[in-house]
Image (cartoon, rainbow, N blue to C red):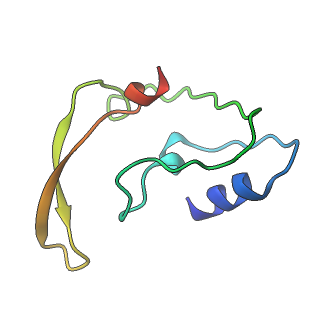
Amino acid sequence: RDALRDLLLNRQSGGIIFTTIQKFALLDEETEHPRLSERSNIVVVSDEAHRSQYGNKSKLVEVKDKNGTVIDKKYVYGYSKYMR
């Protein structure tokens, strides 16, 4: 994920990048998706219609610290909520 973010942030023009939708997932410490580029001409085509990736309903998941201890819970959504 870090490599993809660096690539998008530093590419000024051109380029075709093939990757999986999982590379756009939040990092552990993030609560919302960051802006990955200031460019206005980026197109993302996603054809990974797996059950784990779609859904507009929220799901309550555990938030764990670096030792794996549950410290909180938060609501998350499938990617289709953001892709519409």
Residue 33 drawn above or below residue 53: below
Residue 26 x %, y %: 42, 53
At 71% from the left and 51% from the top, the residue drawn is 8
Residue 44 x %, y %: 64, 32
Furthest residue toward top: 84
Which residue occupies the foreground of this view, 18 or 42? 42
At 71% from the left and 46% from the top, the residue drawn is 38
Q: In the visual, does 6 lie left or right of 58?
A: right
Residue 23 drawn above or below residue 69: above
Residue 14 x %, y %: 88, 41
Q: In the visual, does 25 lie left or right of 35?
A: left
Which residue occupies the foreground of this view, 37 or 16? 37
Furthest residue toward bottom: 67
Q: Quadrant of residue 65?
A: bottom left
Q: Quadrant of residue 55?
A: top left
Residue 4 x %, y %: 64, 56
Give the quadrant of the N terminus.
bottom right
Q: In the visual, does 46 lie left or right of 11?
A: left
Which residue occupies the foreground of this view, 4 or 74? 74
At 36% from the left and 65% from the top, the residue drawn is 29
Residue 22 drawn above or below residue 45: below
> How many numbered callouts?
0
